[in-house]
Image (cartoon, helix red, strand yellow):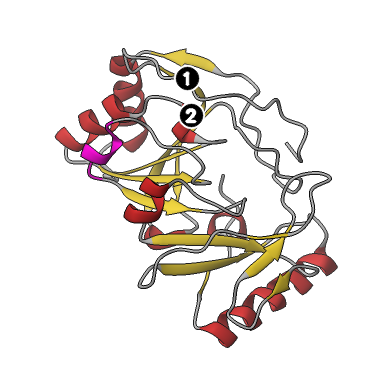
Amino acid sequence: MFGKNIVISQYIEPSGSLKIVDLFYTIQGEGPYNGMPSVFVRLAGCNLRCSWCDTDFETGAKVRELGNLIELIQVAANHRTKLVVITGGEPLLQNIVPLIKELTRRQYRVQIETAGTIWVPLLEECDITLVCSPKTGKVNKEILNRCKHFKYVVGMGDTVTEEGHIVTATQPGAKPMALARPKDGTTIWIQPRDDHNMERNAENLKFAADLCLAHGYRMGVQLHKLIGVE
């Protein structure tokens, strides 16, 4: 969307129906389940406008009832995986709790990828793996208390403090800020930003690798893009 998306607010649908942009079988290319086959459920909408975001989370959005969504996930998985990744946009804009509870009942593992600015009521009752990728200076306290994996997307031009804190501007026209930090003991992943330019991407990759070496962070390289899958 490259910062041109419509910013929306959280909307909680009690029935558990969700507005979905895409659902597909792929290989998880980032974070703690890197390399594992998974079913991606991409929810519509975001409450932020990240200037470098290249994900289309608006086009073709359809409302799916919970029962229909479970069927689509099972068909996509086809007994090949028990990992479902719920992403966006910002997946915590919608009521994902009924979906997660039903997936858990069916023995699926669920990973959620969020920018961490908001929380869904009763999500604390769910068995999930949270991956937070901060885009602002603060994250929701529930995210901070529960998330064990923080991911930072970085590129040349970002500033890194002596303590390894990343200072950057993610929103169009915004001033650089120190991105939110996790509690001690949280795994920190560093991912080079995709600027859709080979020379620039090479610089971003080196910048990310140097940051990992300097501060003991884990490196992530969007494996799915390297092997040419969605």
Depth check: give the residue in front, 207 or 186.
186
Identify the residue under disc 2.
93
Identify the disc placed on residue 130.
none
The answer to which quarter of the image holds residue 75 is top left
Q: Is residue 62 left or right of residue 145?
A: right
Circle 2/circle 1 CB separation < 8 Å: yes
Q: Residue at x 35, y 61 (%)?
A: 148
Q: Residue furthest bottom?
A: 214
Residue 9 lies left or right of residue 68; in this view the side is right
User: Percent from the top left, x then y, of residue 217?
Assistant: 50, 77
Query: Can you tell which quarter of the image residue 184 is in?
Result: bottom left
Q: Alpha-carbon neighbours of circle 2 within 10 Å: few (<14), some, or many (≥20)?
A: many
- The image shows residue 46, relative to residue 140, as above or below, that is above
Dot 2 or dot 1: first in sequence order is 1
Residue 114 position within the rendered picture, expressed as x and y whole percent measured from the top left: 48, 45
Q: Quick one: quadrant of the N terminus? A: top right
Which of the labelled discs sits on residue 11, or is there none?
1
Q: Is residue 23 visible?
A: no
Query: Which stretch is magenta?
Result: 122-127
Q: Secondary structure at mark 1?
A: loop
**Above or below — where is 95 with respect to 29?**
above
Q: CA distance from mark 2 to mark 1?
A: 6 Å
Question: Which residue is drawn at the image coordinates 66% and 33% (left, top)?
Answer: 56
Amino acid identity at mark 1: Tyr
The image quarter containing residue 186 is bottom left
Image coordinates for residue 227, horizontal then vertical, percent: 57, 58
Q: Position of residue 110 (x, y in %)?
A: 31, 43
Residue located 17% across and 40% down the image: 107
Kindly identify the amino acid type of the residue bearing the numbered disc 2. Answer: Leu
Image quadrant where one finds the C terminus: top right
- Identify whether 89 is placed above or below 131: above
Residue 183 among those drawn in magenta: no
